[in-house]
Image (cartoon, rainbow, N blue to C red):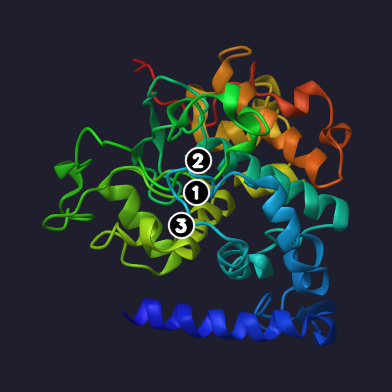
Amino acid sequence: MEAKIGLAICVMAMAACLAGAADKEIKVKTVKGEKVCDQGWECKGWSKYCCNLTISDVFQTYQFENLFSNRNSPVANAVGFWDYRSFILAASTFEHLGFGTTGGKLMQMKEIAAFLGHVGCKTSYTYRSRIVAELVNPVTELPMENNMSYQCGNDAGGYGVATGGPLAWGLCFNKEMSPSQKYCDDFYKYEYPCAPGAEYYGRGAIPIYWNYNYGAIGKGINQDLLNHPEYVEQNATIAFQAAIYRWMTPVKRKQPSAHDVFVGNWKPTKNDTLAKRVPGFGSTMNLLYGELTCGQGDIDPMNNIISHYLYYLDLLGVGREQAGPNEVLSCAEQLPFNPATTKSST
């Protein structure tokens, strides 16, 4: 209840601020020789990133609508759920950390397109089959079983009659349809015990599965998702927050986050170079999905995500030529940062 009240207050503050965006005040001061800023509700916390344009400055409602034009069509399964304000409110809790506020306008637009490229693919039809893989939890280093998408297009009647083709159906879903189990793993019953009656099937902008993942991500965004996993399918802001948290959070200590490898905060080590891991969009897939998507050659799961990213760059007016060469875009030949299975050695 407290979480919902807090979000309601933030929404009212955001509405007031958006109404007077032209009069936005940027507070500036110097801390230890570095310029830091505060831009109120959207970028608060005296950060160097808050001295840049905010996400609502470079990415506006009409652009969100262009990217996700079919999300409220009659054949979609999450009609009325996802909206621009929920995304901006969720993003505002990470902008002071650099999400969508790193670098100049070009980099900001590219990161927004990259993140939403993942989201669009994972909430749309990309694969007919349900693919499961053991990954690593972004906070606790626990194994994560991850369903890759919710399957929109073909299940909604096929792309032959779908306006915009297969890339125009992002945010069609917000949860797994017809889950096969409750996704409760008693191995983690002491740290992340399953709540009575709770089901931990896939929900959100980048699907969350299993009790331990709901528990860990819930801690990260200050929401009790372990006891209330349904929040993710009931509140679009929380759903976006969970996805952005995963984008911004390293899988393990001394590893970069997806954000870091995309915006250039990460410098590959010699081992990374040998593993063909380079900064760019390809490595975001490596960190988020591991060997399920990467190191397998030019497979559909990888190419579908890349296609969404390029499509969004075009729609945002950035242009896919800004995405860089194939070795930056792809992870086809990259070894995973965190292999799902490792061979024991003697």
Quick check: 325 above or below 70? Answer: above
Mark 3 surroundings within 10 Å by alpha-carbon count, few (fewer than 14), some (14 through 19), many (20 or more) = many
> Please, is residue 332 above or below residue 40 in the view?
above
Q: Mark 1 and 3 residues: CB-CB less than 8 Å, in contact? A: yes
Indicate the quadrant containing the N terminus: top left, top right, bottom left or bottom right.
bottom left
Q: Nearer the viewer, mark 3 or mark 2?
A: 2
- Please report whichever mark, 3 or 2, sits nearer to the chain's N-terminal start: 2
Residue appearing at x 47%, y 52% in the figure: 79
Inspect the image, locate mark 2, and give the three-letter code of the amino acid beneath it: Thr
- For residue 65, which numbered disc appears in the image? none
The residue sitting at 74% across, 35% down in the picture is 311
Q: Are marks 1 and 2 in contact (CB under 8 Å)?
A: yes
The part of the image, by quadrant, that contains residue 329 is top right
- Circle 2 residues within 10 Å: few <14, some 14–19, many ≥20: many
Q: In the image, what residue type sits under mark 1?
A: Ala
Q: CA distance from mark 1 to mark 3?
A: 6 Å
Left or right: 51 with respect to 73? right
Q: Say whether disc 1 or disc 2 marks the residue closer to the N-terminus.
A: 2
Q: Position of residue 23 (x, y in %)?
A: 83, 87
Specify the amino acid type for callout 3: Ala
Q: Which mark is residue 123?
A: 2
Circle 2 — which element? loop
| Whole-percent x, y for residue 245 in the image | 52, 56
Q: How many marks?
A: 3
Residue 246, horizontal then vertical, whole percent: 51, 50
Q: Is residue 130 left or right of residue 186?
A: right
As drawn, is 158 to the left or to the right of 147?
right
When asked about the image quadrant of residue 137, the answer is: top left
**Residue 160 horizontal/vertical position (percent):** 59, 21
What residue appears at the point 59 percent right and 44 percent down from the top-left corner?
70
Q: Which residue does the numbered mark 1 point to in the structure image?
A: 205
Write down the residue under mark 3: 239
